[in-house]
Each structure stands twice: as C-alpha cells, then as structure tokens.
Amino acid sequence: MTRNMQVSVRATVTAAIVAAVTATVSCSSGPPAPATSSTAPASSTPPSATAAAPAATAALQPFDAGSLRAEFERAAKEVLVPGALVLLETPEGTLSASYGTGVRDSDRPVTAEDHIRVGSVTKTWTTTVILQLVQEGKLALDDPVSKYRPDVPNGGAITLEQMLTMRSGLFNYTETLELNAAMDQEPQRVWQPEELLALALPHPPYFAPGQGFHYSNTNTVLLGLIAEKVEGKPLATLFKERIFEPLGLKGTVFPEVSSNAIPTPHPQGYFYGDNVLTMTNPALPEDMQKEAVEGTLAPHDVTDVNPSWAWAAGSGISTAADLKILGEALVDGRLLKPELQKKRLDSVAPTDPGKPGGASYGLGIAKFGTLYGHTGELPGFNTFMGNDPVNSVTLVVWTNLAPAADGRDPASTIARTLIDKVYRPAQ
C-alpha cells in the first residue's frame, strides 16, 4: 500500500489507505471470520466457484450489474476523477465498466486495455520474490538485514520478516522534504535506489524493531536490493522470470529507472497541487478544494514524472486484467508453496493492536475485511486490488487521478462503495 507517498507520502499504499477501506469492509460484511479457504494450504490452481458457492450465497447480496455500475459512476464522479475502471467478479455475476476519459477535456475513452502505474502494488512483486528466495533456502525470514546491508543502523536487530511486514521501524524516505521538493522541481529526475536509502537512513527509527507498525517504502527498496544481491540479477529480470511469465502477465512492466514511459494504450495521470503542499496532508486547502469542485482548478498532468523514486516500492505498470490475475495468484498459491503461502496469509495482523478490527498487514500483503490484496498510489494514479478466496470475489479498481482534492484515495473510495453493494450487511 503505498500511500504514502505523496510522493512521498503517498506513493504507494499506506496504512491510511488500508485503514479507510478495511473500516468499510468490516462494516459491510462483518469482521472476517477465520475461514478454512484462507488459511489452509493453497492449491496450485484457483479455488473453484462451485466450492465457494455455498459461502458466497450466504455472504453476498444478489448481483445487480446496473446498480453496481451506477454506484461506480456515482463514486467516481464524487471524487472528481477524469477516468476510472472497475473489474468485479463474483459467483453471482461480473462487472467490467469504465467511467470518464483517459485524457481530460477529450473524448478519449478509458479502456480495459489501458496500462496504468500501480504504485505500491509493486510491493507484492518484491515481497513475493523475497518469499520465493526464502522457500529456496537462499534467505531466511529471521535473517538480520545487516547480513546483506551492514550500513543499515541497528541492522543486526532488524529481520527480513520485520521489513516485509512494515514493522522494522525504518524511516520512510518518501516522508522527507528533500524528496518531495525534488519531485516538484525535477520531475524527470532519475533516482537510484541507493539515493533513496541515503534519504532515509540518517533519520532515527520510528520505534525499536518489532515494536510497532509504520508503512515505510524504505523497507521494500532494501528488499529489492537484497533480492538483486542474492540472485545476481536485476530486479526487473527477477519479476519477469518469477512472476510475470509464470502468470502470463502480458501487460505488466517494471520500468528501467531511466524510463518515464508507459506502454500504449494508456491514460494520462492527474494530480492536484504539488508534493510539498500535500506532503503532510493529502487534502488541498479548503479554498482549493472548492475550486476543484467548481471546475475552476484543474489538476496537473503528471503522467511523465519519472517513477524511479518509488522503485521496488512502487514504480510498476500493469493493466486491470493482469491485476485480477495477480490478485488471485497472491491468494490461491500459484506463486508460493503451500507452507509458505499459508504463513503469508496467516501473517496478516492489525497495524494497531488496540484496534483488532482495523487495518491489517502481513508479509507484503494487506487484508481489507475479507479481501486480501494491496492498494497503490502515486501522483496521478490510484489502484485497488483485492481477492476474497472464501466467497470467490475479485475486485480491481483504478483511477487516473490521485489523490482526490479532498485527500481521499479515489480507487479505494470507489472500491469501498462497491464492497458495500456486494456483501450482505452484518447481522
């Protein structure tokens, strides 16, 4: 989940995003009860709709494509996005719909073939590669980061598992003024991963290792560098060999740091204000929000901003169809062996121990009520990707605006409203 990056603090998903969506899901479907489907060793093929049908019948509302499409369009309009796309699949029915345009003030439609920047969804790629290396015996979850990066302060006490679960305490480089100012002043700048770490490591940690939760892109950048070191290959090659090709992801790309291009077709991505203005609060000042609603304030086109500042934590590109495949594969066991797959799903835990029904995060995967997955945001694009293995529900939403003028994550906001229409209210 990035969010957090604003570019910083919003660039990839963040706990804030997870919290917002989880709260809604929990209200709409009740606290997720432990289910055999979500914790048992996963098979190498997706769970069948037939097996999930009894649970789906009880948990899901009658599928009304017209009502769902209307709710999707209403929510998209409310958050002022130029364009959005939804892909929803349940045993009761499916919905594939678009809203608006890919380019403001044009008739260029949003299409299912569009490529978009997926922000922190990239984290699921990086963390999956790390877990694959763990099951191959090349890494261990309890390895200290100092074994691979002796320059990390207190690295002997920080484990790979704590970085995977965002419980290392390492400072998030995307929360620095240096990065946000540079993003505004030099949007085409090429960032090397070591430069990103240099922004983070001088800062004190948020807490002692394992003693809290803080969504930090620094964790995932370090994990990407460790994967490259252990395998002796570029991260892009590891993603291609270990995830993209095995899953048949034809529209998914991890760009070179020098590239700010997006494969065609693609929409433009839009962003209100600037990174420094929204660094600590993604919402615009009230007067600017009013202007955005009235249409007198236009968002900036940030499509061509170089995403290297997010690297292993959020620079990926994909399509709705590929995100559906990926979201399901993260849950059904196609990327990990049963034992480690079970551990991954079981690892999801509340980010705030005092709020057991709130946001949850685990080994590079989040849980939104009954849906496992991830969200992703960076200026211009927001993505929600979730899969409920018990009820066989998959939901993908993307928007070409992020964040909204009022600070909300547009795709997550739309997803939340749709979830309320898919699941029956808690009894």
Image: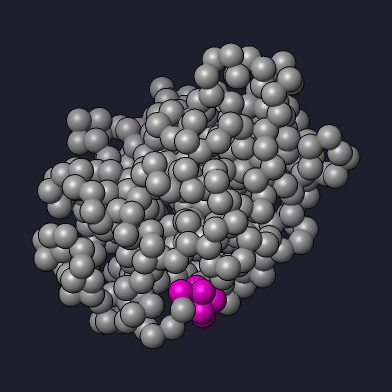
Quarter of the rendering containing residue 331: bottom left
Compared with residue 417, is residue 392 higher up or lower down, i.e. above or below?
below
In terms of depth relative to the viewer, which is nearer, 350 or 175?
Answer: 175
Where residue 226 sits in the image (x, y, percent)? 32, 73
Figure coloring = one colour
**Count of numbered circles in the view:** 0
Q: What's the magenta bit mostly, secondary-structure-wise?
A: helix
Where residue 143 appears, as percent x and y from the top left, is 17, 70
Rendering coords of residue 102 (x, y %): 77, 44
- Residue pictured at 29% horizontal, 69% vertical: 339
Indicate left or right for 45 with 199 as reference: right
Q: Is residue 91 above or below residue 402?
A: below
271 left or right of 376?
right
Q: Nearer the viewer, residue 204 or 184?
A: 184
Whether residue 290 is situated above or below residue 258 in the rendered picture: above
For the record, the magenta segment spans 235-242
Whether residue 102 is visible here, answered yes or no, is yes
Q: Is residue 51 visible?
A: no
Residue under the image location 47 percent in, 36 percent down: 276
- The residue located at (32%, 81%) in the rendering is 230
Residue 238 highlighted magenta (yes or no)? yes
